[in-house]
């Protein structure tokens, strides 16, 4: 229990790998590159150290009074979702360079802060608050964006900021009407550029939150369950 879904293998994968190893005469079957890597790492660590580490983790989890009532931030649910996002970025790598020229730095940072506010990644909040300052945003506007308030955004960018919030709230699957409104307002080229920016920050948000979720579960709820702005 307590291990994020993307670290688990489906029953079909486990059975297929096990049967294949059985046909090949292997006595021990270890499905999945992740588990094979763990075995390799465990062989390099002294057994006594592994024992102490395991006992320490159990003690932390057992001593925690905080119940696991659901991690409050969005994470990658499985490895496939992460790979799909990475593949999208790779396929659009040429467009990413164009996006950096097409959208002003301040515009990009407003979009990223809007998405980060919805997803709640503390690492991205800190990093992009710094970049936003360098891009000309005030401390007050940055604080507002991280609270979900967009009153200080330039009128021309409002449609995109609202779309970014909606996009993040719908986990990257926006209402088609919202997408069409974005195209109507900015044109297809700029709308696609905005979409790429949103995908980029989603990867950072979900990756940071997934790391925190692992900390949260390992520590019995003591670590990781914090937002940058509380």
Image (spheres, rainbow, N blue to C red):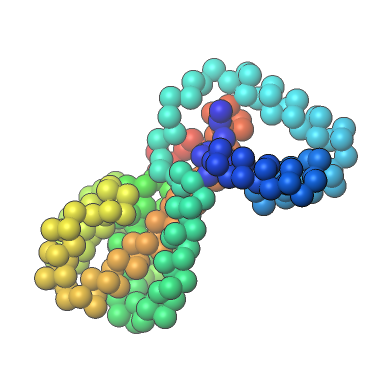
Quadrant for residue 161, please give it.
bottom left
Left or right? Give the position of 12 relative to 108. right
- Residue 160, image x and y in percent? 21, 63
- Residue 39, image x and y in percent? 77, 44
Label total for image: 0
Left or right? Give the position of 123 relative to 59. left
**Residue, x 69% and y 24% (percent of image)?**
58
Q: Quadrant of the N terminus?
A: top right
Q: Nearer the viewer, residue 186 or 85?
A: 85
Quadrant for residue 155, please give it.
bottom left
- Residue 226, image x and y in percent? 47, 38
Kindly tell me whether residue 199 is visible in this rendering. yes
**Residue, x 44% and y 34% (percent of image)?**
71
**Residue, x 65% and y 25% (percent of image)?**
60
Q: Quadrant of the C terminus?
A: top left
Kindly tell me whether residue 153 is visible in this rendering. no
**Residue, x 24% and y 75% (percent of image)?**
190
Q: Is residue 28 above or below residue 151?
A: above
Q: Nearer the viewer, residue 131 or 53?
A: 53
- Residue 151, image x and y in percent? 17, 55
Left or right? Give the position of 110 relative to 175. right
């Amino acid at each position: 229990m307590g291990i994020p879904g993307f670290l688990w293998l489906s029953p079909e994968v486990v059975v297929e790998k096990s049967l294949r190893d059985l046909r090949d005469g292997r006595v021990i079957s270890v499905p999945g590159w992740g588990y094979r890597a763990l075995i390799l790492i465990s062989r390099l660590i002294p057994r006594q150290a592994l024992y102490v580490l395991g006992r320490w983790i159990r003690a932390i989890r057992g001593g925690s009074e905080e119940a696991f009532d659901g991690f409050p931030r969005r994470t990658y649910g499985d490895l496939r979702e992460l790979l799909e996002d990475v593949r999208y970025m790779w396929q659009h790598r040429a467009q990413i360079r164009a996006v950096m020229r097409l959208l002003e730095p301040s515009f990009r940072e407003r979009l990223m802060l809007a998405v980060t506010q919805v997803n709640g990644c503390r690492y991205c909040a800190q990093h992009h608050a710094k970049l936003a300052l360098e891009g000309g945003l005030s401390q007050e506007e940055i604080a507002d964006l991280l609270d979900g308030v967009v009153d200080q955004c330039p009128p021309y960018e409002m449609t995109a900021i609202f779309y970014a919030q909606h996009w993040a709230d719908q986990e990257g699957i926006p209402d088609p009407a919202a997408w069409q409104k974005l195209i109507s307002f900015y044109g297809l080229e700029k709308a696609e550029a905005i979409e790429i920016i949103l995908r980029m920050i989603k990867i950072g948000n979900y990756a940071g939150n997934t790391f925190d979720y692992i900390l949260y579960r390992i520590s019995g709820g003591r670590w990781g369950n914090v937002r940058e702005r509380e």
